[in-house]
Image: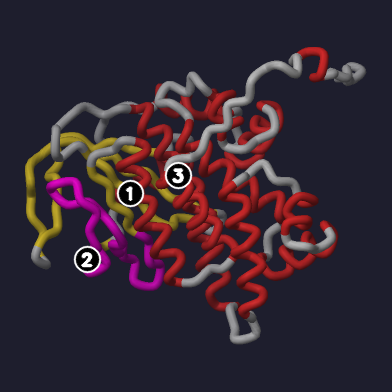
Amino acid sequence: MPRKERRRIDWRVTVPDEVPLRPVSASGLTSEFAETASSVLTDPSPQTLDRLLCCSVEFARNVIGLERVGIFLFEPATKAMVGTWGTDADGKTIDEHDIMYDFGDLDREVFARAERGFPWTVFEDVPLMSQANEQTHIIGKGWVASTAIIGLSGPLGVLYNDTGITHGAVDESKQARLAVLSSLLARAIETSRTALGKIGDDITKHQHRLVREVTQLLVRDPSLSCDALAKGLQMSSGQLARAFKHYAQVSIVDHRNEIRLARFLGHVDTKAGNLLEAALEAGFGSYAQFHRVFRARFGQAPREYLLEHRASQASQLPV
């Protein structure tokens, strides 16, 4: 299909100068999640990954609005699902590193359905678990949603959630946002696991400082260009781009986009009705730029992704 001649738009004519700007600061949890995810991508370690998993549970509860959340990671060597962080019977975040269970048929079904385009699977009328005093307690029965965390190498983990406190119904709009969170988590987890074996003593404090400083600047203002970052760090943009890519193993552009996507997740509403506003608040320069980045990252247009996954889920037990 032949392409049409590209039209040039002069925004100075389309949007008058007197249109007021309304800068919006991200919430504390949104900024913390973005910065922590970036730390895992640029300076992977068991500590930064574990901090991200804990932050993700807090983010899912306090920003997305889920009641109880837990993250289990798949351990291929032992064929087990190992606990990380979760939520107790009262809705508080707790350490669940001391629990694990065998990878089974239901887990295979969760990942198989995710590969077929269903990011989460809802199991109904199942026991709802809580950990306390080094014991597992059943606090009732209800539904449990299992959101697959899948990387390029295969299954990485599962993000569980339920409404064991209020026993409310499944909110598919929240599950769709959780699917975006799990996709961002997948990249961070896979990057961390790949890089941990390559980290050596030759990584200097200066290298860490450069990555941290760029990340901190972008978290405060994700609209910053490479030129603006370089000016703030008293470097040339070429030097900064090459040094950051060398030390972080990711370009500044890709790193900035991950921060923006994480912030977008904290701003988009449950019905995906404020995509433009959420994209601009996340730091994207235009909706077209956001749309291009989101589509490249998730394989679908943002509204299509959020609404399709929200509408396509059936609350049924897999056979």
Name the element at disc 2: loop
Q: Position of residue 45 (x, y in %)?
A: 49, 71
The residue closer to the viewer here, 154 or 218, is 218
- CB-based contact (under 8 Å), mark 1 and mark 2: no
Q: Which mark is residue 30?
A: 3
In terms of image quadrants, where is residue 46?
bottom left
Q: Which residue is mark 2?
A: 99
Give the residue drawn at x 51%, y 22%.
274
Q: Nearer the viewer, mark 3 or mark 2?
A: 3
Q: Amino acid at mark 1?
A: Glu
Q: Position of residue 261 (x, y in %)?
A: 56, 41
* Left or right of 209 in this view: 102: left
- Which of disc 2 and disc 1 is earlier in sequence? 1
Q: Which residue is mark 1?
A: 58
**88 w.r.t. 168: above or below:** below
The residue closer to the viewer here, 80 or 37, is 37
Give the residue drawn at x 52%, y 66%.
192
Give the residue drawn at x 56%, y 62%.
191
Q: Position of residue 216 (x, y in %)?
A: 58, 57
| 35 part of magenta stretch | no
The span picked out in magenta is: 73-101
Structural crowding at the residue carrying mark 1, measured as other residues with C-alpha within 10 Å and reported as few (<14), some (14–19) or many (≥20)? many
Name the element at disc 3: helix
